[in-house]
Image: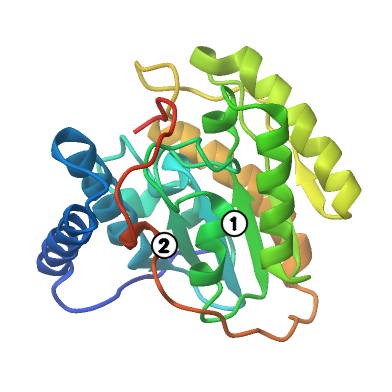
């Protein structure tokens, strides 16, 4: 981390752990009450929603508001302290809206309403000077058309805000798929006129699952993204546009997704 950038962690609320437990219970109650999930699926989606909400409440840094929309990498799955996941390396006030197993396509995850386009309005509810979208590893088993459609829906939801799309790294478990998704995202970013940061030719250390980053991997990943973000946050911020603040993952039970990473 550059010596001039010292992260400041603001824990929203005075009882983070207690609040997380309450949120988990609310998520599970909502999912079960919807009639769309029972048993293991409901428990899994509720657990992932809790992890998402805990990371959302860990705000790092200060300055221009950076909104991160991503997957388990953003959440910090596998880390002892999720506040140290890669977005903590970014300059500015960083708010993270991640959901493990989610992606650009609608059915990357078995939990409903967690694709990036569905979650964007909630993430942007307090405005954003820059949006960083990270992901793609959970889209490796999805049709190209689903990835492209989800990407285009997301760009529409972002409403012209400055955005950087960070592609998937070559995690050993999904290296071939990552390269394919990387090519799709590169094409879609060029079509939309947004900046794309490819990670597919970068080397990172991974956990034993050959999919998620180690603490050192998060540091390296975040430093690469931070260098690009630093070039953009120095520019005058765009006007923030209010958006609806209803968490999409609190709406219904698990959908028909395909074995997304937890």
The residue drawn where x is 55% and y is 30% is 137
Look at the numbered disc 2 and give the secondary structure of its residue: helix
Please state if 49 lies on the left or on the right of 202 as rendered: left
Q: Where's residue 94, x and y in %?
A: 51, 66
The residue drawn where x is 64% and y is 13% is 176
Q: Which residue is mark 2?
A: 248
Q: Which residue is mark 1?
A: 117
Residue 146 figure quarter? top right
Crowdedness of circle 2 by 10 Å Cα count: few (<14), some, many (20+)? some
Say how many tags the image has.
2
Crowdedness of circle 1 by 10 Å Cα count: few (<14), some, many (20+)? many
Q: Is residue 201 visible?
A: no
Please state if 216 lies on the left or on the right of 90 as rendered: left
Q: Where's residue 114, x and y in %?
A: 45, 51
The residue drawn where x is 24% and y is 57% is 34
CA gap between label 2 and label 1 equals 10 Å
Depth check: 252 or 182 in front? 252
Q: How is the image coloured?
A: rainbow
In the image, residue 218 above or below residue 246: above
Look at the numbered disc 1 and give the secondary structure of its residue: helix
Residue 7 figure quarter? bottom left
């Amino acid at each position: 981390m550059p010596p001039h950038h010292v992260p400041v962690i603001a824990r929203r609320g005075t009882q983070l752990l207690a609040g997380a437990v309450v949120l988990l219970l609310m998520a599970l109650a909502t999912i079960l009450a919807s009639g769309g999930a029972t048993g293991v699926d409901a428990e899994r989606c509720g657990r992932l929603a809790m992890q998402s909400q805990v990371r959302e409440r860990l705000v790092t840094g200060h300055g221009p508001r950076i909104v991160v929309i991503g997957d388990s990498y953003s959440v910090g799955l596998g880390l002892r302290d999720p506040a140290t996941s890669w977005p903590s390396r970014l300059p500015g006030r960083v708010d993270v809206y991640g959901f493990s197993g989610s992606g650009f396509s609608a059915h990357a995850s078995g939990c409903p309403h967690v694709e990036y386009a569905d979650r964007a309005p909630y993430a942007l509810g307090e405005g954003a000077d820059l949006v960083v979208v990270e992901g793609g590893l959970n889209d490796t088993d999805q049709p190209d058309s689903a990835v492209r459609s989800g990407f285009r829906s997301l760009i529409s939801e972002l409403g012209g805000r400055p955005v950087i799309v960070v592609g998937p790294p070559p995690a050993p478990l999904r290296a071939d798929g990552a390269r394919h998704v990387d090519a799709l995202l590169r094409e879609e970013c060029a079509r939309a006129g947004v900046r794309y940061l490819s990670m597919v030719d970068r080397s990172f250390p991974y956990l034993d699952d050959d999919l998620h980053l180690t603490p050192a991997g998060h540091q390296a990943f975040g430093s690469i993204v931070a260098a690009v973000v630093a070039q953009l946050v120095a520019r005058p911020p765009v006007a923030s546009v209010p958006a609806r603040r209803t968490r999409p993952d609190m709406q219904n039970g698990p959908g028909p997704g395909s074995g997304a990473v937890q």
